[in-house]
Image: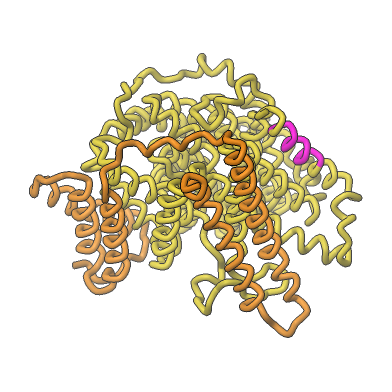
Chain colours: A orange, B yellow
Amino acid sequence: MKDLIKRNSGNFVFLVLSAGVFLITSGQISSKSNDVAEARRFPYMMCGLIAAMSLLSILIDIYKWRKKELEPQTAEDGRKAYAWIKTIIAAALIIFWFTMINMLGFIICTAILVGGITVLAGNRNVISIAAVAIATALVMYLVFAVLLQTRLPEILF
Amino acid sequence: MDIIVSVLQNLFSLQALLVLVLGSAVGMVVGTIPGLSASMGVALMLPFTFGMEASYGVLLLVSVYCSSIYSGSISAILINTPGTSASAASMMDGFSLTKQGKARQALDISLNASIFGGIFSGVLLLLLAPQIAKAALTFGPPEYFALGVLGLSIIAGVSDEGLLKGLILGGFGFLISTIGIDPVSGIYRYTFGNSNLTAGIDSVSAMIGLFAISEMFNQLEIGAKRMVQAVKVDNEGIGMRKMKPYVPTMLKSSVIGSIIGAIPGTGSAIAAFMAYRQAKASSKHPEEYGKGSLEALSAAESAKNAVTGSAMIPMMTLGIPGDAVTAIMLGGFTIQGLAPGPQLFEKSPILVYTIMIGFLLANIVMMLEARVAIKAFSKISNISNHYMIPIVMACCVVGAFAINNNLFAVKIALIFGVMGYILPKLGFKNLVPILIALILGPIVEQNFSRSLVLSDGGFGIFFTRPLSLIILLIAAGSILLGLRKKK
């Protein structure tokens, strides 16, 4: 039973998601005009499709489970426990980049992002980390701001 | 005869060759960096054309266009992130080949097929431009809707984990594509008062998150030393001679790409997916598709670049741009004081043929430049993750920002990155259906609603117009064929 629930966790997520979006759609897309039905048509159709397919997947798995045809799930490829913490730190570094860039500037923020992720990638050599971080930030600045004329946040340092 | 001599004099001048070399190089840089689109590359070059002679100015834009559409596949093959949305279909097989140590082969196939498609559509541009433009204009909303449905039918083909999962993800992608202003009624959907969401979710930042950022998260988690592990990198490339087995596929795909490209408002992404689907349906080895098939890659690549020439057909013959890039190129024509349309052929035949033959030359110059670049690019898969992950992550973040000079795109990329990291853990490993639906969703919805407006709400419009009916039948047939082959 546990395996069945674990196997269908994705389907449950999509089932809840489609129900949530359906409720938001009926609440949020509101207007006095006659076009409301039109604006809601495709979101409703897609919510229906997602819910129906998720439910069908769950039912098929329950049927197979009762008939004992369900193959045991294979384990994930030897990932270390808490390895996902690295993902959270990497995501936090990206959040830092886009929240601080207007204050610290492009080069400093990019260097911190690159340096942080280099450490997460397993590099422990301080000189190498600093070199990668600074060089990447400068090259990015040259490519985007100078060569491609992209308007990067104005404060350089 | 005088015209031919003048055209050749124009094209084989030092200025023209320099312009082509520069344009191809810029296009390659722009196309390879995720987040920078072909339209951005062409727009970037537009100011440089001010002081140029008309033919050279347009040639510069043409070479940037061809090269950036091609080179979007380089990052798709090497780091699982299409540089432009046109290369999304190449990502599945391209990156699988890189993981097998065949990055060089994948890059070679991609280049050769792109050149094939580009030259094929260039010849069409030269020979059949006015006729194709007239035929393409017969497309109305029902036909566009049918075309979108045909594109969506690819989901059945790429869902190797089962059709149900493919439909769930496709529906999810479609749902995301409805964020923003409803195309017909103008009502805001799921914007939650955020003005950044009114234009909807940008497919490129979604792509960067879904495939590149999530891949980097995974690499960090696994702690692998290299992105491509324990596989000997095969340095043996694929020359033009070894392309023989793929010629029929490339030919069919180039025809598909040329037809799609000539229809205004479609673009390379839809052509590449349709050619991929068609090639899979007629392949002797459909089971290899999505797992590193050279044939699949050749199909997507040739169709993608076949769009470039044919998208110029409605622009040059009728003054109607085929896609976003040709819309900007139309601006380039205006800068030069030219008015594309039937009169352009009568008033400036030398210029017109310089551009058309120059298009073929641009593809050849691109091939020569790319041959040199590929040798360097194919070694990227050998770089240690200590350097690769941070550099790719920085490219993704800055690339997402560069799409519209907007930090909101970075937030979107991060959200999709987290989504791309979590969904495989929930049993949804192949996320391509989300991307297909995200790209094609707006085309389908917009034209569905417009068709219903035309028919006063009657669904018969899709089945009473011959072209629309034929395309819908092909879509139904390809889904059934795909399901049958899977069984």
Residue in view at x 79 percent, y 42 percent: B471
Residue B476 inside the magenta-drawn segment: yes
Q: Is residue B288 left or right of residue B19?
A: right
Residue B415 image-quadrant placement: bottom left
Q: Is residue B346 left or right of residue A101?
A: right
Q: Position of residue B246 (x, y in %)?
A: 58, 21
Residue B137 inside the magenta-drawn segment: no
Q: Position of residue B193 (x, y in %)?
A: 52, 79
Q: Is residue B386 above or below residue B204?
A: above
Start-end of magenta stretch: B473-482
Q: Residue furthest bottom?
A: A32
Which quadrant of the rendered structure holds the N terminus of chain B? top right
Q: Position of residue B277 (x, y in %)?
A: 65, 35
| Residue B328 visible in image | yes
Residue in view at x 24 percent, y 36 percent: B225
Q: Main secondary structure of the magenta part?
A: helix
Which quadrant of the rendered structure holds the C terminus of chain B? top right
> How many numbered marks, from 0 up?
0
Which is more toward the observer, B316 or A78?
Answer: A78
| Residue B60 visible in image | no
Residue in view at x 62 percent, y 56 percent: B174
Residue in view at x 41 percent, y 43 percent: B32
